Amino acid sequence: MGNWLLRWQFDKPTYQPGDQVRVNFWVENLGDTILFASEVGLQLEFQQKQNLYYKKECAAQVSPRATQYVSSLVLEIPKTIAGIVRYSVTYHLSEYSQAGRIWQDLGPFWEELKWYIKVLPVPYYQAFVSRGLPPEDRLVGDQIVEMIQEWGFETFTVGIDELVDRKALAPAIRERVTSSDCLIAIATPRYVDALTGYWRTLEWLHGETGIAFGTSRPVLILRDQGVVVGGLPGELTELSVPYDPLNLEELRQKLGSVMPIFRQWVAGKRREEFLAGLAKVGIPLLIGGIVGFLIAGSKK
């Protein structure tokens, strides 16, 4: 019975969207039989539904109790992906049978999505996040803020990252909004409008969005799909992305398409260019560490 250890190592600890990635593979033969590696590969999380993966054919024979470099695999991180990107490993081995003097194809091996690489966009931008402070709002808001941070934004919210006396609240908010590169609002439901029966969000969103809009800062509104937003934010429907609070993974996928073009707006491009890019966004892509290894064996 053969036993082996597959090792791999990425060429960098972190990547940026669009980066080229090189992964090196080794096979350590822990048994007494001869092994032959004919293919290695990686499948990133977004490739699963399409049943695609990056692969590299190879021809590496590994003697008993020896370690052999197998091959290197080159792939590219899509420009629409950032944050923690999970991946699985696949490889194909054969084993030489001393008794039968034949090579036995062990077939391809597939591992689960239990490793990851980190993809960080640069440069970092300062984002003022307008959101609710009560625990019921933060339950969803904290998760969304983490998604925003994955796209290269340092986030700040008055009342969470800085406690301010009520008398100084208004000037503190204005100062923080105007010193930020953009504003991202998270519109969570707070009360039901008695006349319409629709959920409304709190007035803080209107004022903070107004400051950003009035000073020509990029604005993005992430809105609970059950909330009707009034005032100025309600007029900025083209800048609004709805989300389902019970399925935040869907929002993460949407941000994979929205955030690259929003970052371009923040970088200095015009609002019209952002809106044109947003209009072209279709179905979003579905979307660790620098080294990894796994131990396996044949069933002979």
Image: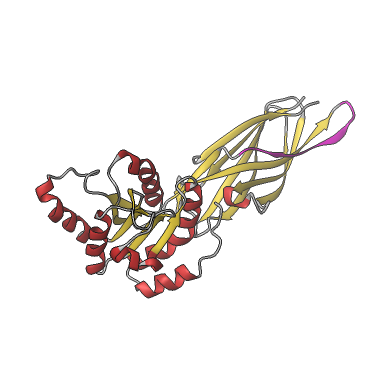
Image coords of residue 75 (percent x, y): 58, 54
Image position of 276 with respect to 105: above or below? below
Stretch in magenta: 99-112
Q: Quadrant of the N terminus?
A: top right
Q: Nearer the viewer, residue 169 or 291?
A: 169
Q: Locate residue 159: give its quadrant.
A: top left
Answer left or right for 78 relative to 195.
right
Direction left: furthest residue: 167
Image position of 245 with respect to 296: above or below? below
Image coords of residue 63 (percent x, y): 73, 32
Report the label total. Answer: 0
Q: Would you say residue 204 is visible in this rendering?
A: yes
Q: Locate residue 27: give its quadrant.
A: top right
Q: Tell me if residue 102 is in the magenta stretch.
A: yes
The residue at the point 75 percent across, 27 percent down is 2
Q: Tell me if residue 270 is in the magenta stretch.
A: no
Answer left or right for 41 relative to 242.
right
Q: Main secondary structure of the magenta part?
A: strand
Image coords of residue 31 (percent x, y): 72, 25
Answer left or right for 212 relative to 247.
left
The residue at the point 51 percent across, 66 percent down is 281
Q: Quadrant of the C terminus?
A: top right
Q: Nearer the viewer, residue 281 or 13?
A: 281
The residue at the point 61 percent across, 50 percent down is 73
Image coords of residue 193 (percent x, y): 33, 54
Q: Would you say residue 180 is visible in this rendering?
A: no
